[in-house]
Image (cartoon, rainbow, N blue to C red):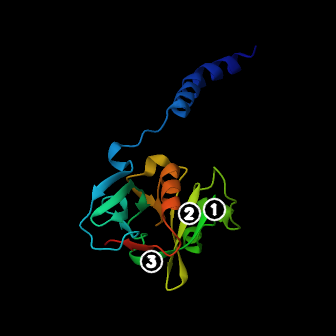
Amino acid sequence: MDRRWVLLTLATAPLAFARAEAANKKFVLAEEYMPQLVDVDADVAIGTILIDPAKRFLYLVEATGVARRYGIGVGRAGLAFRGTAEVGRKAKWPSWRPTDNMIRRNPKKYSRYAAGMKGGPGNPLGSRALYLYRDGRDTLYRIHGTTEPWTIGKAVSNGCIRMLNEHVEDLFERVPVGAQVVVLQ
């Protein structure tokens, strides 16, 4: 046996064990970001989606004064959508293409996806996407799942609203195309 190989193996073993241990750890979402019914003071129609980026919550108004609240990840400063929109379309296991602005901002990370990426478990949009439209035009902002569940509760995305895949699947089934979306300032 080669001595260098033995030394290299011994030197890298702790790192290999640490990676294996991290891979086996299951992500646990903080209780506050789990879906739950909450009181809301908003005077909006039932079925409206309210998004509070500052608090990292999405609310689906289910009755007068009552909403289902989900934890979300939001866009970094300067990258977030604001105002009103509607769900223009919905997709299961959506394909993804970074926007031209994303590619310009970080070509090293995004240019390899310029032709797009098929939907599936490794796709950044996760298992479901709700496409936000304004005046009949795609805003390029989405409410979607994520492959990075630890980002829920944080401002790290390129502007879209991220949810755990299980949570966006639940929302997807509850919200029709045409639903109003209000993103608070």
| CA–CA distance in space, label 3 to label 1 | 20 Å
Residue tagged 2: 129
Quadrant of the rendered structure where residue 76 is? bottom left
Q: Are marks 2 and 1 in contact (CB under 8 Å)?
A: yes
Residue tagged 1: 94
Name the residue at the bottom extreme.
135
**Residue shown at 33% from the left, 53% from the top:** 37
Question: SS of the residue at dot 1?
Answer: loop
In the picture, measured across the screen, residue 85 lies left or right of residue 56, that is right
Residue tagged 3: 85
Question: SS of the residue at dot 3?
Answer: strand
Query: Does label 3 or label 2 sit earlier along the sequence?
Result: 3
Image location of residue 96, percent across then percent down? 63, 64
Image location of residue 157, percent across then percent down? 47, 60
Query: Does label 3 or label 1 sit earlier along the sequence?
Result: 3
| CA–CA distance in space, label 2 to label 1 | 6 Å
